[in-house]
Amino acid sequence: GQNIDQPTEMTATEGAIVQINCTYQTSGFNGLFWYQQHAGEAPTFLSYNVLDGLEEKGRFSSFLSRSKGYSYLLLKELQMKDSASYLCAVRRYGGSQGNLIFGKGTKLSVKP
Amino acid sequence: GAGVSQSPSNKVTEKGKDVELRCDPISGHTALYWYRQRLGQGLEFLIYFQGNSAPDKSGLPSDRFSAERTGESVSTLTIQRTQQEDSAVYLCASNRGFGGARTDTQYFGPGTRLTVL
């Protein structure tokens, strides 16, 4: 079956760096996505990894190790507006061509 | 339109009633997805459309749930004889589907918050 794990909640300080981990167990891995979801709003796309390594995009970076079934999202220079839930999602080959299996999300609180 | 839109934004209904939720995907997006998000939970896949066919209905929780799509546009998710456990935010997403890049992400609508009393 499919299983995606990420911490339920994290707290960090404005200006700091935080790393949100995601581990997954799935067959037919075809990419991992990170989404940001502010309370009461739709998820918005942050990053995509399909090969091992680090993808950097401004203050946000995402890392993938397929052999370990592990990814992390790194947020630098935290701002108050980064307080949100961060969703890890895995896409699989076969079955539905595009559906994503989501983790339960990590609620990040950024404090002054 | 510029983004995925959904209506209504909020729906309160009584147990046992039927509800219809609507999704307008981004123009040109052939793939459309419905998800459910219960309070404090992750997104739960319900159904996926490629054009107006649904190759994957595996996520529909019961036969009270059904969905249709007209061509490559509007989709309607219908829940019959609603139950309190159906209360959730129902999210719709779209992307280019087949023919799109492997990195083609899904773009989400704002969701419909359904409350069953």
Image (cartoon, coloured by chain):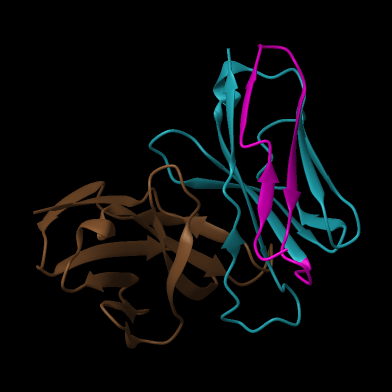
Chain colours: A brown, B cyan
Asked whether the viewer can see residue B38, the reply is yes
Left or right, A66 with respect to A101, comes to left
Left or right, B92 with respect to A87, comes to right
Above or below — where is B65 with respect to B70?
Answer: above
Above or below — where is B4 with respect to B67?
Answer: below
Image quadrant in which you'd find residue B63 = top right
- Seen from the viewer's position, the closer of residues B42 and A92 is B42
Q: Residue furthest front?
A: B2
Asked whether the viewer can see residue A26, the reply is no
Q: Residue at x 50, y 52 (%)?
A: A42
Q: Could you say where residue A17 lies in the image, as x and y percent from the top left?
A: 13, 70
Above or below — where is B42 with respect to B64?
Answer: below
- Seen from the viewer's position, the closer of residues B79 and B72 is B72
Q: Residue B27 lies in magenta, yes or no?
A: yes
Image quadrant in which you'd find residue A70 = bottom left
Q: Residue at x 38, y 51 (%)?
A: A38
Quarter that holds the C terminus of chain B: top right
The part of the chain drawn in magenta is B1-30
Total of numbered circles in the picture? 0
Q: Could you say where residue B55 lies in the image, as x and y percent from the top left?
A: 80, 58
Q: Could you say where residue A103 lies in the image, as x and y percent from the top left?
A: 41, 53
Q: Residue furthest right?
A: B71
Q: Residue at x 74, y 65 (%)?
A: B31
Q: Residue at x 79, y 37 (%)?
A: B66
Quarter that holds the N terminus of chain B: bottom right
Image quadrant in which you'd find residue A75 = bottom left
Q: Residue A60 lies in magenta, yes or no?
A: no
